[in-house]
Image: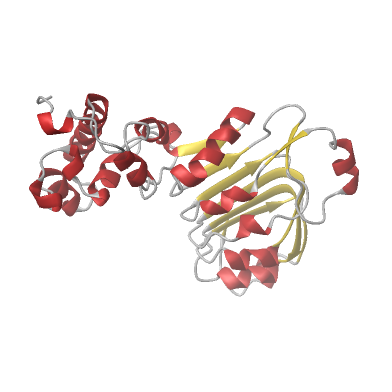
């Protein structure tokens, strides 16, 4: 790694002015460049390579301070969310860039995706500590695209939603409750999985993600929702509901006729069937 320019060694309030920040940026840029080179047939934008090699912002300042926010966010986007969260402590530039960084989409196939491994892109919330991470990321890294919600621990619960099951609410009244509404800040969310999560009642916030493509809700008998709520997910391609408190008519899926491709609904209280109630074709998962 080339020596750090003297002008960036000075401590300047809130700016990238230390060797740690330079090392983190250099490492991220190296990862980004290596992965683009290793994937010559990928769909990566050619402009990314050009911007990595020649960013003319900030009067051609060759230091970290001279990188534009877009370039910094692009570089951070080649790291996993854990590394990005660590990098934020380096300087204000990294913190600002993280807020606009988009971590690439990943499909789990047992292999690394184009830029990152599945585990580093998908936030899995299955403990109180992971819930705290999600709360922090809702403002620090709001463009995360994939989240899974599970049970968060013994005698720990999410705040009840609207019209909760009174019996369950009474049985968990002395449990520690945790915020949930902040999930709405992840406006770029494309995949949401909810499995055995302690959600009780209706949560309209779960069905207001315009870019969401994949929704899975399994074994959440106290999470109340209706097929009509899917109107808030205009980009939905895959829907899975198993042992869920789902109600409504299959005909309600017609609002997604232009996007919906795969549907799996089992052990739910719905009306109609796919063969006779839908005016369009979808595959069964």
Frontmost residue, 145 versus 235: 145
Q: Position of residue 137 (x, y in %)?
A: 49, 41
| 188 lies left or right of 206 | left
Q: In the rendered view, does 230 fall on the left or right side of 109?
A: right
- Is residue 5 something that shows in the picture? no
- Image quadrant of residue 104? top left
Relative to 44, 134 lies left or right: right
> Residue drawn 57% across and 31% down?
130
Q: Residue at x 80, y 32 (%)?
A: 175
Residue 246 lies, with reference to residue 21, above or below; the image says: below
- Rendering coords of residue 117 (x, y %): 38, 33
Is 218 left, or right, of 224 in this rendering? left
Q: Looking at the image, which residue is at 26% across and 25% down?
A: 20
Q: Nearer the viewer, residue 38 or 203?
A: 203
Residue 26 seen anywhere in this rendered image of the structure = yes
Please, is residue 160 above or below residue 79 in the view? below
Q: Position of residue 90 (x, y in %)?
A: 32, 31
Name the quadrant of the N terminus. Answer: top left
Across and down, in percent, residue 43 comes to 25, 51
Give 166 or 111, whichever is nearer the viewer: 166
Quarter-wise, where is residue 265 in the image?
Answer: bottom right
State the residue at coordinates (54%, 59%).
Answer: 209
């Amino acid at each position: 790694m080339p020596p750090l320019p003297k002008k960036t060694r000075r401590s300047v309030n809130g700016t990238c002015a230390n060797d740690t920040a330079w090392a983190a940026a250099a490492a991220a840029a190296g990862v980004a460049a290596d992965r683009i080179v290793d994937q010559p047939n990928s769909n990566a934008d050619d402009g990314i390579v050009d911007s990595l090699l020649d960013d003319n912002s900030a009067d051609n300042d060759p230091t970290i301070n001279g990188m534009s926010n877009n370039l910094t966010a692009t570089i951070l986007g080649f790291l996993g969310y854990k590394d990005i969260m660590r990098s934020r402590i380096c300087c204000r530039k990294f913190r600002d860039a993280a807020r606009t960084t988009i971590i690439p989409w990943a499909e789990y196939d047992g292999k690394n995706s184009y830029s990152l491994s599945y585990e580093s892109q998908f936030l899995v919330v299955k403990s109180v500590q992971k819930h705290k991470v999600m709360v922090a990321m809702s403002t620090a890294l709001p463009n995360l695209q994939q989240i899974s919600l599970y049970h968060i621990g013994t005698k720990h619960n999410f705040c009840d939603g609207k019209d909760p099951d009174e019996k369950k609410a009474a049985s968990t009244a002395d449990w520690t409750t945790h915020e949930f509404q902040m999930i709405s800040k992840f406006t770029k969310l494309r995949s949401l999985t909810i499995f055995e999560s302690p959600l009780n009642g209706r949560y309209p916030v779960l069905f207001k993600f315009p870019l969401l493509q994949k929704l899975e809700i399994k074994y959440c008998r106290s999470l109340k929702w209706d097929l009509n709520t899917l109107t808030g997910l205009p980009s939905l391609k895959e829907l899975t509901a198993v042992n869920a408190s789902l109600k409504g008519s299959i005909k309600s899926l017609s609002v997604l006729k232009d996007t919906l491709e795969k549907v799996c609904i089992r052990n739910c209280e719905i009306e109609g069937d796919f063969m006779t109630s839908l005016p369009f074709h979808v595959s069964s998962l």
